[in-house]
Amino acid sequence: ESRNDRQEKHQQNIHAHHLIQSFSPEDNLTPEEINRIGYETMMELTGGRFRFIVATHTDKDHVHNHILINAIDRNSDKKLIWNYALERNLRMISDRISKMAGAKIIEKRFSYRDYQKYRKISHKFELKQRLYFLMQQSKSFDDFLEKAEQLHAHIDFSQKHSRFMMTDRSMTKPIRGRQLSKRELYDEDFFR
């Protein structure tokens, strides 16, 4: 079974797509105008072939649209395949229509590359790197604890939760072991 087969099976199980179209709180647009922006965006994206609902929420400090798109073409029973190109087209159409209506265009969030840069400077990432290095270089648990001090890693197994801290960084509070990994429990038994 290839990756494309799995993706195709996954697409077959999708009956609708849910999108959120956000607007800046500084936009001076009425909920009706924001709803119209959502409607025009969907009409241009789908060509009117797919049924959709645009619900404008005003309950938060910023007005936003929730958009549900039926995944089945109402004329030919073909599926709407959601992929990167369709998402990019949606963003371009939405930005153009929003700009014409006078809304601010929300800047792009982190790209994967930017996220990787951020992740590499985070305390959790660096602490995990040090712990894995210590595990590879240590011959015993006592050796692990001794080398941890040399690498400025403070390790505390005395409480209910294991706690880790880097003493050479500006960490204000320790990180619990369960926050370092979703798969493994960073407790004393894990390092023994």
Image (tube, rainbow, N blue to C red):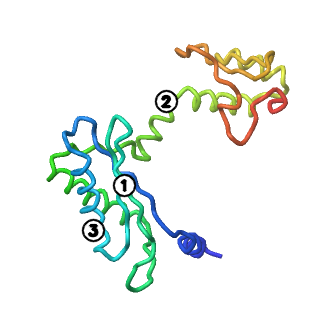
Q: How many marks?
A: 3
Sequence-first tag of 1 and 3: 3
Please tell me whether mark 1 or mark 2 is closer to you in this view.
1
Q: Front-most of 47 and 59?
A: 59
Q: Quadrant of residue 80?
A: bottom left
Cβ–Cβ under 8 Å for marks 1 and 3: no
Write the residue at 79% across / 21% down: 160
Does residue 159 appear left or right of residue 94 in this picture? right
Q: Quadrant of residue 135?
A: top right
Numbered mark located on residue 43 in the image: 3
Sequence-first tag of 1 and 2: 1
Provide the secondary structure element on which disc 2 rests. Answer: loop
Write the residue at 52% across / 14% down: 170
Residue bearing the label numbered 1 = 55
Instruction: Tell me residue 17's x, y (percent).
Output: 45, 63
Please tell me whether mark 1 or mark 3 is closer to you in this view.
1
What amino acid is at disc 3? Met
Disc 1 to disc 2, C-alpha distance: 40 Å
Instruction: Tell me residue 52's x, y (percent).
Output: 37, 66
Numbered mark located on residue 121 in the image: 2
Write the residue at 30% across / 64% down: 42
Q: Quadrant of residue 152?
A: top right
Disc 1 to disc 3, C-alpha distance: 15 Å
Does residue 79 appear left or right of residue 175 in this picture? left
Instruction: Tell me residue 185's x, y (percent).
Output: 76, 35
Instruction: Tell me residue 25's x, y (percent).
Output: 27, 36
